[in-house]
Amino acid sequence: MDASYGTLLKPYMPLGKIAGSLAIGDTVSFSANLIGNVLSTDDDMVLHPQVVAQFTKLSKIDDPAAAR
């Protein structure tokens, strides 16, 4: 699917470099364009969401409390 959507973050791209520097549990801010999704039951959408998005901005929030 990525050939038509261009959604993968490659490591040499600016967003890929940011994503590669993140650790599990880091708080981030992002913007993205929603390209598609699969609608299903409420429970399934919470437990197994299927969303295709193209990120346009991504940044780590160093102090999550200050961002609120």
Image (cartoon, rainbow, N blue to C red):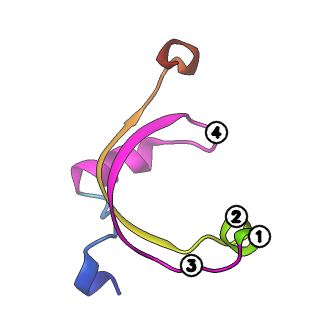
Task: State which quadrant residue 59 falls in.
Answer: top left
Q: Left or right: 45 with respect to 19?
A: right
Q: Left or right: 51 with respect to 47?
A: left
Task: State which quadrant residue 60 falls in.
Answer: top left
* 4 and 2 marks in contact (CB < 8 Å): no
Residue 43's disc number: 1
Q: How far apart are marks 2 and 1 (CA)?
A: 5 Å
Mark 1, Cα crowd under 10 Å, few <14 / some 14-19 / many 20+, is few
Point out residue 16 in the picture as x, y percentages from the top left corner: 32, 54
Residue 52's disc number: none
Q: Which of marks 2 and 3 is in front?
A: 3
Mark 3, Cα crowd under 10 Å, few <14 / some 14-19 / many 20+, is few
The segment highlighted magenta reads 13-41
* 2 and 3 marks in contact (CB < 8 Å): no
Mark 4, Cα crowd under 10 Å, few <14 / some 14-19 / many 20+, is few
58 in magenta:
no
Point out residue 15 in the picture as x, y percentages from the top left corner: 29, 50
Q: Distance between the residues labelled 3 and 1?
A: 11 Å
The residue that mark 3 highlights is 39
* 3 and 1 marks in contact (CB < 8 Å): no
User: Residue at image x 70%, y 77%?
Assistant: 41
The residue that mark 4 highlights is 25
Task: State which quadrant residue 13 falls in.
Answer: bottom left
Residue 46's disc number: 2
Q: In this view, does 65 lie above or below 20?
A: above
The kind of residue tagged 4 is Gly
The kind of residue tagged 3 is Leu
